[in-house]
Image: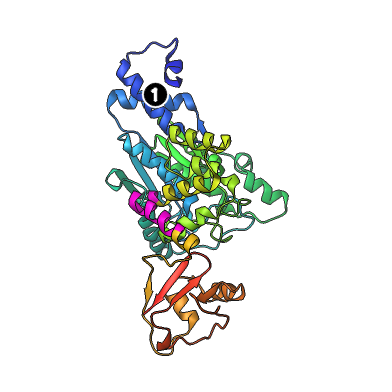
Amino acid sequence: MKVKKYLENKDHNYSEATISDAQKQFEKLSFKISEITPEDEFIKMLLHSIDSKTPLRVKCGIDPTGTDVHLGHTIPYRKMREFQEFGHTGVVVIGDYTAQIGDPTGKVESRPALTSEQTKKNAEKYLEQVSKVLIMDKTEIRHQSEWFNNVTLLDVMNWANQTTVAKLVSHDTFRKRLDEGHSLGLHELFYPVLQGIDSVFINADVELGGSDQKFNVLMGRDYQKWKEKRPQVAMLLPIIHGTCGTQKMSKSLNNYIGVLDEPFDQFGKVMSIPDKLMIEYAQFASSFNLDEFNSFSNSLEDGSLHPNEAKKRLASNIVAVFHGEEIGQKMRVQFEEVFKKKNIPDEIPEFSLSPGVNITSVLVESKLLSSNSEVRRMLKQNAVGIVDEDKITDMNLVLDDSYKGKVIKVGKRKFLKLV
């Protein structure tokens, strides 16, 4: 019992009810976490929060450098949701300033600068997807421009005075770039500084981030101490592997499960992961609680749960996170019908044919595929065809009225009815 152990040999006035509640919250909130720094301070925060009926302010930042959110991106926001279920406040910081710098983590070159208009549009789309996870009436949406628009050069110099170049270049990515002879812009050194200053302005108690964000999150503690505020606790979450099983989830690697993917496609992508990833996805990407996770993993280990059945349960659970329990179960039924009985799903998107339209336009406009280049790639792989008919290989194939009522199939899981 971590909470009781923390209170050993400490004078306190906490009631048994407060201690019990703190232990309950700690057990759930620490599950699926890679690291809590410092853990004792987090326990102290929980006890004080419960005793004083003061919700914790839990921060997580969004750098709207793009619009697509995948399963890996949602992990810290789902942890924020757990905090909200205990009555705490989620604070989503829109990095409309840092997005114009670009988080240097894992990069060997500076990102191209974005305009404020681009970051605004991206943020709107990003929030639309994150809202599927969070309790929005317990969420504050804050923009860095609220405080950074009024910053003076003297402010910047004072912030810079609180850290050193030696400390900044000790950042793994910065050090690696310098060691390998790559360029490192002065503006990039300010990224962790600005992220740290965010925590001062919003009075963060906890900051959530991926395990690769530890350096930046701890900068928030430094700047809060400088301003004589209670320093935030860093809660770091894992970076999960993509569906390929070898590299981290990434849209550029096409190994991701997107929040905006159709439920049937989400289900199929989970079914496609290597068996070795099931425990990782069950622990970090599902909504399984600790008991459910232990039952799932133990049953897999002792052989009482067949891997195929396990994967179906996992896929249903992950779909349910974004679309609800009923849809999660429905996708399982559809998946089994399609792949066991070779049927078409009951509900598939439709596309209205117009005179002279070709297959490439249909696939892109319907959003079944994202671009002409993806169409070209899928055609070359013989992955596009008409159900019960031949494969399609010509990008310029015109779909006339004779195609109405037919169904296009792309890969194993994507269908489109022509009307």
- Does the stretch in magenta take in 138? no
As helix, strand or loop, the secondary structure at mark 1 comes to helix
Q: Which residue is mark 1?
A: 23
Residue shown at the point (42%, 42%) measured from the top left: 287
Q: Is residue 335 magenta?
A: yes
- Image location of residue 36, percent across then percent down: 50, 32
Q: Nearer the viewer, residue 60 or 403?
A: 403
Between 153 and 207, the one lying in front of the other is 207
Q: Which region is colored magenta?
A: 320-336
Is residue 79 rendered to the left or right of residue 172?
Answer: left
* Amino acid at dot 1: Gln
Q: Against 151, is 208 above or below? A: above
Q: Quadrant of the C terminus?
A: bottom left
**In the image, residue 92 above or below residue 112:** above
User: Considering only vertical position in the picture, is 330 above or below 418?
Assistant: above
Q: Position of residue 335 (x, y in %)?
A: 45, 58
Describe the colour scheme in one phrase: rainbow
x and y, in percent, of residue 320 in the image: 38, 50
Q: Residues within 10 Å of mark 1 (few under 14, many from 20)?
A: some
User: Most extreme residue toward the front, as rendered?
Assistant: 341
Percent of width and height locating residue 2 = 46, 21
| Quarter that holds the N terminus | top left
Q: Quadrant of residue 90?
A: top left
The majority secondary structure of the magenta stretch comes to helix
Decide if residue 34 is in sight here: no
Q: Nearer the viewer, residue 191 or 83?
A: 83
Q: Is residue 165 visible?
A: yes
Name the residue at 49% across, 36% down: 33
